[in-house]
Amino acid sequence: MPRTFEELAAEEMDALYQGALFLCGGNPRAAEIVLVDTLTLAFRDHEREPDAPPIQHWLEGRMVRAFVRRTASGPPPLPPSGPRNRPSGRVGRIGTETLFKAAAAVPPWPRAAIWLVLLRRWGYQEAAAVLGVARDVLRDLLRYRDHMMSIVLRSSGRRNGTHGDAVPT
Amino acid sequence: MDCLEAREGLWPPERPKLAGDAVLKARRHLEECAACREFFLQDRALLEAYESLRGTRAPLEVRERVFDALAEARRIADAPHARGTRRGGRMRTRLGWSLAVAAGLAMVALGVMRMAGPDISSSTDAGMFVEDYLRRAVGEDHLTTSNPSEVSRFLVRELGMSLTPLHVDGLELEGVEICLLEGRRGAMIMYRKNGRSVAHYLVPKEGTRIRLPVLSPRLLNRPGTSPGVVTWASPSVEQALVGELSPPQLLQLAISGSTLE
């Protein structure tokens, strides 16, 4: 039996909300706005292409587009400037608060790229396509991951490693 | 091969790959490059942090706003052919239900006000279901249908949950509408059995555990003063049957028609 968009959305709602929380740096109100944007835009697209499978992947793509549309002003930023400082450190368990804080410190475009590729395991090519950027640009966006990781490591450093977030070496 | 190429070539690291030239080169690079090995260790930690969010559920009010927005989007999309059936059905059913329950309202209201005895708990208070049953003169969104699939779709759309109407021989489905019980949004499915009206309430409530159907103890103490009420719960949903049948008949309906999944 064909399923309505609402039924599909209900099944994917929690996973999308988790993604929206990351994209919004842990801000629940902003995550709600992104989620509503995502699903209403996706509803219209789904009406036009009801056979777009698989739905989870498809909705994730809609979500980064909704997020970038709402939060990013202008084109993707240039890669991080200055010499590349590789964030070095042995990482233990990273708490969600630390993850959100690190995400919030990265501009919207690279945050969307990091979510798709590093956290949702999209391939580079399809992630570049859904973000509407060239593959080289996607690689540049992903370089912000080092900045995010530095914040994770610094955050754990301030805690002297006693809270188990990450352990600098 | 540099670090960026190697990482891209092995991405995502947990997915098996055909060992072509590029993949072999990337693997060799990884063996020799401490930075890339550290990158993948850090990547694992980031992924685990994200996956720890898996238990986070979209709060009920967020789900409501999403489904309100979707309902609005669908109303706009369906506007040319939806207007007649939904509005017309609403009016027809409202009138029918008003007439059907009107005779009992005064007696029932009186009975509710006189009810005495300790509450079971706020979440299983049968009185709240009765009160909303009596407030049906005004309502929220509404669908008139005898098709269980349409009701299920309505419930998914409006409440964000997969719920099914009761299925019992002789119980005729008439429609469904949204209700508000102590600030919680739920649904009331309307049936008719042997010419008498019966309402099935479903109120999503996080953390609710399975309870088997029971007659309201308050009503057992005062038989004949108000409609019968049977309450039970499936995971995350408080449920009740309220109607013009006898309490044992309602209990039988709840037991034979409901699932606790």
Image: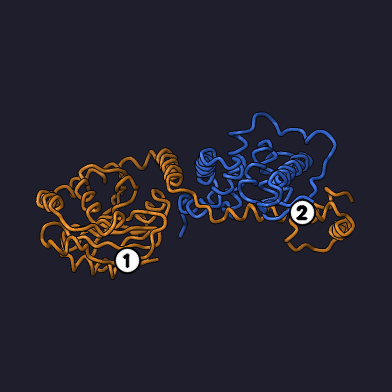
Chain colours: A blue, B orange
The residue sitting at 32% across, 56% down in the picture is B202
Q: CA distance from mark 1 to mark 2?
A: 53 Å
Dot 2: element: loop
Q: Is residue B147 left or right of residue B56?
A: left
Mark 1 Cα-neighbour bin, 10 Å: few <14, some 14–19, many ≥20: some
Q: Is residue B203 above or below residue B194?
A: above
* Residue A44 in view of the camera: no
Q: Nearer the viewer, mark 1 or mark 2?
A: 2
The residue sitting at 88% across, 49% down in the picture is B2
* Res B17 quadrant in image: bottom right
Instruction: Please tell me if label 1 and label 2 are on a single chain.
Output: no
Q: Amino acid at mark 1?
A: Ser
The location of residue B241, given as percent across then percent down, is 25, 60
Q: Is residue A119 left or right of residue A44?
A: right
Dot 2 corresponds to which residue?
Answer: A90
Q: Amino acid at mark 2?
A: Arg
The location of residue B208, given as percent across then percent down, is 38, 59
Q: Is residue A126 left or right of residue B225?
A: right
Residue B258, label in figure: 1
Residue B145, label in figure: none
